[in-house]
Amino acid sequence: MVCAGALIGSSVSRHRYGLSNKHHEILSYAGAAGALTAFMGIPIAGSIFALEMTRSNEGLSKASGKALSPAVISSIVALAVVRGFLLPSAAVGGHFHYGPVGTLSGRAMIITSVACGLGGGLLGTSFHNLVAMMKKVAWSTKNKNESPWKRQLLVKTSIGLIVGIIGTYFPQTLFWGEGSLQTVIDGHQTAFSATKHGLADVLTSAAKVNPSLPFADPAVAAQIGIVKIISIALACAGKFPGG
């Protein structure tokens, strides 16, 4: 099956680019990866497997530098075609079962994945632009005689103060992931202050949104998300390690 996919990729390459071309091997790997993913529903693992099965030892093929991205794209397209169009009502899972996730139909999974991918791309682009704008404001100076350490002190102190104030009103920006994840897993039956990485109630008394209670509505969740993005962008613009 995998070899058949590779042969189809080779045929497409010859038809499109001629007998001798640099795309021949790349499209062979893309075809193999797409066939494997269509059969097993594993786009990332399928891409890696297609590139390592032609090696007699560990590691990927020498062509992986150029073929990995096409193999991944081929796998994603194969999964989208099978799950979104050929078998739109089949449960998600392939050879495996993921409990409640398996109740999603293939079409619902594809639509959700595309929406999240586009949203993530938009959010990531906006974040990078926000950080670039903040850096331009924070580090540009008209005084050429200003000492570098004074600019460092001013910028880092100011950003630290701003992030601290934000954390006072939105303590969710100070959370460690383990603590906030625990409150989500059990439906906020565990108060955040009771988790290993939680904050004492006195530190969350001024919170606009109680970190130990479920979000009242989607608008509150969006509000927390926006504030967290701003806090991380400030930390990145201030050159603090770890965000």
Image (cartoon, grey):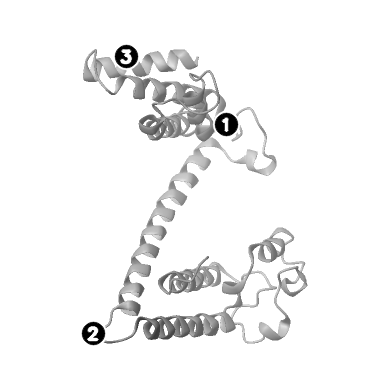
In the picture, the disc for residue 122 is none
Specify the amino acid type for callout 3.
Answer: Ser
Q: Nearer the viewer, residue 225 or 129?
A: 129
Q: In the rendering, at what x and y percent does residue 20 appear?
A: 24, 15
- Which is nearer the N-term, disc 3 or disc 2? 3
How dense is the environment of label 1, judged by Cα within 10 Å: few (below 14), some, or many (20 and up)? some
Q: Nearer the viewer, residue 27 or 66?
A: 66
Q: In the rendering, at what x and y percent does residue 37 appear?
A: 50, 27
Q: Residue at x 30, y 18 (%)?
A: 12
Label 2 residue SS: loop
Judge from the rendering whether residue 187 lies leftward or rightward of residue 145; answer left or right. Answer: right
Within the image, what quadrant is residue 45 found in? top right
Q: In the rendering, at what x and y percent does residue 107 appear?
A: 50, 38
Q: With respect to residue 21, does 68 lie above or below?
A: below
Please state which of the two labelled residues, at mark 3 or mark 1, is closer to the viewer: 3
How dense is the environment of label 2, judged by Cα within 10 Å: few (below 14), some, or many (20 and up)? few
- Which is nearer the N-term, disc 3 or disc 1? 3
Q: In the rendering, at what x and y percent does residue 70 appear?
A: 37, 32
Specify the amino acid type for callout 2.
Answer: Lys
Label 1 residue SS: loop
Judge from the rendering whether residue 156 lies leftward or rightward of residue 211; answer left or right. Answer: left
Judge from the rendering whether residue 62 lies leftward or rightward of residue 196; answer left or right. Answer: left
Query: Mark 1 = which residue?
Result: 90
In the picture, the disc for residue 142 is 2
- Which is nearer the N-term, disc 2 or disc 1? 1
Label 3 residue SS: helix
Within the image, what quadrant is residue 69 found in? top left
Query: Mark 3 = which residue?
Result: 11
